[in-house]
């Protein structure tokens, strides 16, 4: 059976940062390689008219490729996730990684009053998403009026992301952004990185640093602000409940609400 997590030996600051950030670097590298591979492989498929189809559905294809690459990348981190998120006696280390993972989810649900936590987390996630979006939109409008330009919270990168996200049918968007994206991101940012930061630093720092990294991961200013604020709330939710379903469902509900309202 999996043993208790030990206290990580205190090392230099650089070694701590490397230990904390290694999963993120691995995730980004694998995801980038996977996206490039898929982007090259799909148009090269021996299917009549594939080039024309790819050109006509470039945004849709980008969304699907991004999700597929995310799943591929996070698969390289499942062992790290189990080491950080699982506690003593929950997972049989003689089983395969995926069996360990699903056993962990089953135990978390039973141990952590999963249904109640999921309901409460979903409500808070949806309400938080709506509230944050209203605040950010009003702040962006204010800055636009002050500067008489696009506004400091606007960005071309964000507009490009929006085009990709809302080019997909609703049912597919709910799968990509309501299930796959939160699932992958919670494994990386809360399941691994947040827990690793807590090995060396106070919870408050772990909440802030993991949230900042989560915001920066999104790659544009509007989503950085939103992602950082949401990352703080999600990390606090995880710390308060000590159940992985809390941040997962919180994130899922937030994404679904934003996708449906903005679509």
Image (cartoon, rainbow, N blue to C red):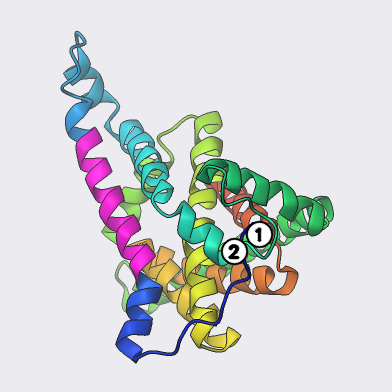
Quadrant of the frame with the N terminus: bottom right
Is tag 1's residue or tag 2's residue first in the polypeptide sequence? Answer: 2
Residue bearing mark 1: 244
Q: Residue 187, percent across and down?
A: 52, 57
Q: In the image, is residue 199 above or below residue 185? A: below
How many residues crowd mark 2 within 10 Å: few (<14), some (14–19), many (20+)?
some
Asked whether residue 175 is drawn in magenta, I would say no
Q: Is residue 42 left or right of residue 108?
A: left
Q: Residue at x 30, y 49 (%)?
A: 31
Which label belongs to residue 34?
none
Residue 216 quadrant: bottom left
Q: In the image, is residue 158 above or below residue 194? A: above
Observer-nearest residue: 169 or 29?
29
Span shown in magenta: 22-38
Could you tell me what secondary structure mostly forms the magenta stretch? helix
Instruction: Assign a secondary structure to mark 1.
Output: loop
Q: Residue 240, percent across and down?
A: 72, 74
Determine contact: label 1, label 2, CB under 8 Å: yes
Residue bearing mark 2: 85
């Amino acid at each position: 059976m999996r043993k208790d997590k030990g206290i990580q030996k205190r090392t230099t600051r650089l070694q701590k940062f490397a230990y904390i950030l290694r999963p993120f670097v691995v995730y980004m590298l694998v995801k980038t390689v996977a996206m490039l591979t898929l982007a090259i492989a799909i148009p090269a498929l021996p299917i009549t008219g594939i080039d024309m189809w790819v050109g006509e559905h470039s945004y849709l294809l980008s969304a699907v490729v991004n999700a597929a690459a995310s799943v591929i990348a996070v698969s390289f981190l499942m062992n790290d996730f189990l080491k950080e998120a699982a506690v003593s006696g929950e997972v049989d280390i003689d089983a395969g990684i995926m069996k360990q993972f699903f056993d962990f989810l089953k135990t978390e649900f039973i141990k952590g009053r999963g249904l109640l936590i999921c309901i409460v987390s979903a409500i808070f996630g949806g309400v938080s998403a709506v509230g944050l979006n209203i605040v950010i939109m009003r702040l962006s409008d204010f800055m636009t009026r002050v500067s008489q330009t696009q506004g400091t919270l606007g960005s071309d990168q964000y507009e490009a992301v929006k085009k990709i996200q809302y080019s997909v049918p609703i049912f597919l968007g709910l799968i990509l952004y309501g299930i796959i994206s939160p699932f992958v991101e919670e494994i990386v940012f809360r399941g691994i990185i947040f827990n690793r930061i807590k090995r060396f630093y106070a919870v408050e720092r772990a909440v802030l640093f993991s949230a900042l990294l989560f915001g920066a991961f999104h790659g544009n200013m509007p989503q950085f602000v939103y992602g950082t604020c949401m990352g703080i709330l999600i990390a606090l939710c995880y710390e308060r409940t000590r159940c992985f379903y809390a941040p997962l469902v919180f994130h899922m509900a937030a994404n679904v609400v934003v996708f449906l309202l903005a679509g």
